Image: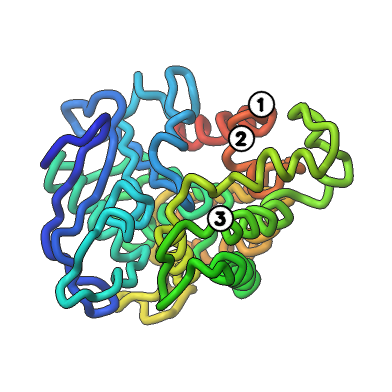
């Protein structure tokens, strides 16, 4: 274990991936909040979302908040490809000059499990909470390690990347890689135009029809829709490494809790293996993690013990699940998570 800035690094060593490749010296960055109790049963695991680092998501961790460090020991593992854990941007050389390997959610969860067991001696998780790609990781945890997970909150996520969601990501990838900086299968310099185009696509998919119809962007101080798009979405990904983004798009598109030896691609079987208390909390107006995916998953959670589908009644689309400046959505999530933790 080594320390880096305000977070820690778990040195996982040479790790065999689902793809059959071996990733040498794989590194998992993580940060903890609160104190692990003597029984080691007050653990909340909070995986990161697309492009996000723990700095971007830790706002939810606060005394009296949905994830309270005064009561729980909270761990945020940074997903591979986010620039802190092993990523194209910080992996300078692989044997033989090989490209950055394809990593899956199953790979990520396997290393996260090693962190919990080897570093902290944790065998039970009170809650795995995640939004978007974090929610997909929460679903993978619940399916693959039912012996460890007591509860899981999947916020604007799904058990499998749907065809429609996959198409959205194809459009994002196409916009990004159309930039002339993309050469030979990777970005050789920062794709300024590609990142801006990606932001414009995200602006339409991430927010809802109602958000633009009702000009809700005015609540953020913008005079016109164009001012909002230029001020928020044109720069939304400007500080991210484009090769890292491609790595995480591949993880997202390949997301499927059943795509492993244990379930052989049988999604119903994977859902049926979950024994955790499940809270599925999609955004009612989310366009790419459509709430109907969770609606179809719910009756398949036959061993989950009173699984609940609780859509967020918001016009903020996918962003309803990460409501940093949306008090009503934030309060809705807090109430739902508090009830889950008290169940």
Tell which circle, 3 or 2, labels the residue nearer the N-terminal end.
3
- In the structure shown, which secondary structural element does the residue marked by tag 3 occupy? helix
- Mark pair 3, 2: CA separation: 27 Å
Question: 10 Å neighbourhood of mark 3: few (<14), some, or many (≥20)?
Answer: some
Return the x and y of residue 9 as percentages of the image width and height: 19, 43
Relative vertical location of residue 340 with respect to residue 61 in this rendering, above or below: below
In the displayed structure, does residue 92 sit left or right of residue 143?
Answer: left
Return the x and y of residue 126 as percentages of the image width and height: 34, 39
- In terms of image quadrants, where is residue 173? bottom right
Judged by depth in the image, the label closer to the viewer, 3 or 2, is: 3
Question: 10 Å neighbourhood of mark 1: few (<14), some, or many (≥20)?
Answer: few
- In terms of image quadrants, where is residue 91? bottom left
Question: For this rendering, which residue is in front, 237 or 78?
Answer: 237
In the displayed structure, does residue 127 sit left or right of residue 301?
Answer: left
Question: For this rendering, which residue is in front, 150 or 258?
Answer: 258
Q: Which mark is residue 192?
A: 3
In the displayed structure, does residue 132 sit left or right of residue 323?
Answer: left
Figure coloring: rainbow
- In terms of image quadrants, where is residue 98? bottom left
- In the structure shown, which secondary structural element does the residue marked by tag 2 occupy? loop
Tell which circle, 3 or 1, labels the residue nearer the N-terminal end.
3
Return the x and y of residue 272 as percentages of the image width and height: 44, 67
> Where does label 1 land, which residue?
327
Q: Are marks 1 and 2 in contact (CB under 8 Å)?
A: yes
Q: Which mark is residue 323?
A: 2
């Amino acid at each position: 274990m080594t320390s880096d800035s305000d977070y820690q690094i778990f040195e996982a060593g040479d790790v065999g991936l689902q793809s059959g490749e071996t990733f040498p010296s794989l590194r998992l960055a993580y940060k903890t909040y609160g104190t692990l109790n003597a029984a080691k049963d007050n653990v909340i695991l909070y995986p990161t979302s697309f492009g996000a680092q723990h700095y971007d998501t830790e706002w939810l961790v606060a005394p009296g908040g949905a994830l309270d460090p005064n009561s729980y020991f909270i761990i945020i593992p940074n997903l591979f490809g986010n620039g802190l854990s092993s990523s194209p941007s910080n992996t300078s050389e692989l044997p033989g000059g090989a490209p950055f390997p394809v990593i899956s959610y199953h790979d990520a969860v396997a290393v996260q499990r090693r962190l919990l067991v080897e570093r902290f001696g944790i065998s039970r998780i009170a809650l795995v909470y995640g939004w978007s790609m974090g929610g997909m990781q929460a679903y993978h945890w619940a399916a693959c390690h039912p012996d460890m997970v007591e509860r899981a909150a999947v916020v604007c996520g799904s058990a499998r990347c749907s065809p429609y969601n996959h198409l959205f990501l194809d459009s994002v990838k196409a916009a990004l890689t159309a930039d002339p900086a993309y050469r030979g299968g990777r970005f050789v310099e920062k794709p300024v135009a590609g990142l801006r185009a990606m932001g414009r696509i995200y602006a339409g998919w991430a927010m809802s029809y109602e958000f633009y119809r009702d000009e809700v962007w005015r609540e953020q101080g913008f005079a016109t829709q164009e001012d909002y798009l230029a001020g928020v979405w044109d720069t939304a990904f400007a500080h991210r490494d484009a090769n890292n983004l491609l790595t995480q798009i591949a993880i997202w598109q390949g997301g499927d809790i059943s795509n492993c030896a244990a379930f052989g691609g049988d999604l119903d079987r994977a859902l049926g293996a979950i024994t955790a208390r499940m809270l599925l909390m999609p955004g009612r107006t989310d366009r790419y993690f459509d709430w109907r995916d969770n609606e179809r998953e719910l009756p398949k959670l036959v061993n989950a013990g009173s699984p609940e589908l609780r859509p967020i009644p918001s016009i903020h689309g996918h962003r309803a699940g990460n409501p940093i400046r949306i008090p009503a959505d934030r309060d809705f999530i807090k109430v739902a998570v508090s009830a889950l933790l008290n169940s």
